[in-house]
Amino acid sequence: MTDEARHLPSPAPPADLRARQPKAVHSALAVLEEVARCGAGVTAQEVSENLRMPRATTYRLINLLVQDEYLVRMPDLRGFTLGRKVVELAHLVAPVRPPQAAVAVVEELRSGIRGGVHLVRYEHDRMRVVDPDPDFPLADEARLFAELDASAMGRLLVAELLETGSPLPASVRPELRASPERQESLRREVSATGRSWQVDAFTPGFGCLALPIRGPRGELVAGLTLSAPRIRIEQPGAVLELLSDGARRLAPLLR
């Protein structure tokens, strides 16, 4: 849970689950909102305390939301994050689109590259997919946010947090969180190559690479990601030059 989330006001205490059904529904929605507010990795105890809700009621509601895939347990089983159904609901609402000039650059790249070209924005320790490739849908968007270091676009953000000495969010997997050696390897990889990449994490034989897009002070503001067969990620060739040029053109449009 980020420091910002800790200081956000919590909603009024919801009614106990034993109340009438409409109030029980209100309680479940309050739990869902609190998980979204706190971010990936928030625990049932934290939700209970933030909402001033009885612990047994909180656990019961969280278990129901997990069963219905509105929430999902983190890989280390210690906390929760938003699940697949929340992502699907979010897609029913028109996302905030990047500027039209930026969209034009991304569409130009898609027309010349075989593979999925996606644009993401970064805000502190959070990531948002603002322009996913409609012809190459993301394999598992819920997992992108539940396991931040599993994808190239997420690894780019984690490397930036490591570079600046910022705390890692709870959505970073335990094996990376507990290993300073792995953290340093990731930081050096991105620092040396100017990109991040991964293969076989979501779909066998496929992978993705991500290039940073930086603001006027060198801060990470966005990322340009390519999803493609593994061989094209490991040996990007001329495609890397196209993506690098696209990232340079996008930088002044996304500040």
Image (spheres, helix red, strand yellow):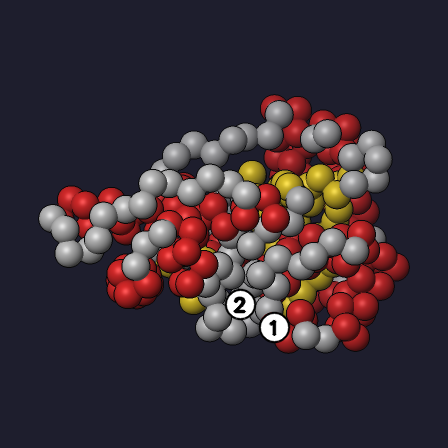
- Foreground of the two, 110 or 38: 38
Amino acid type, callout 2: Thr
CA gap between label 2 and label 1 equals 21 Å
On the image, the x and y values in percent for residue 63 come to 30, 65
For mark 1, what is the residue? 174
Residue at position x 65%, y 53% in the image: 153
Above or below: residue 201 compared with residue 160: below
Q: Amino acid at mark 1?
A: Pro
Residue located at (82% from left, 32% from top): 216
Task: Kindly identify which residue carries mark 2.
Answer: 203
- The quadrant of the image that shows the C terminus is top right
Residue 108 falls in which quadrant of the image?
Answer: top right
Q: Along the horizontal axis of the image, is 33 left or right of 172? A: left
Side of 183 relative to 23 (left or right): right
Lower sequence index among marks 2 and 1: 1
x, y (%) of residue 97?
A: 54, 30
Say which residue appears at 85% left-offset and 57% top-offset. Answer: 191
Q: Secondary structure at mark 2?
A: loop
Quadrant the N terminus occupies: bottom right
- Asked if residue 114 shows in the view, the reply is no
Estimate the x, y position of residue 78 in percent, counting from the top left.
Answer: 48, 70
- Residue furthest to the right: 192
Residue found at x 62% / y 25%: 99
Nearest the viewer among 46 and 98 is: 46
Q: How many marks?
A: 2
Position above or below: 33 against 59: above
- In the picture, the disc for residue 145 is none
Q: Position of residue 52 (x, y in %)?
A: 36, 52
Mark 1 surroundings: few (<14), some (14-19) or many (≥20) residues within 10 A: few
Residue 170 visible to an observer of this rendering: yes
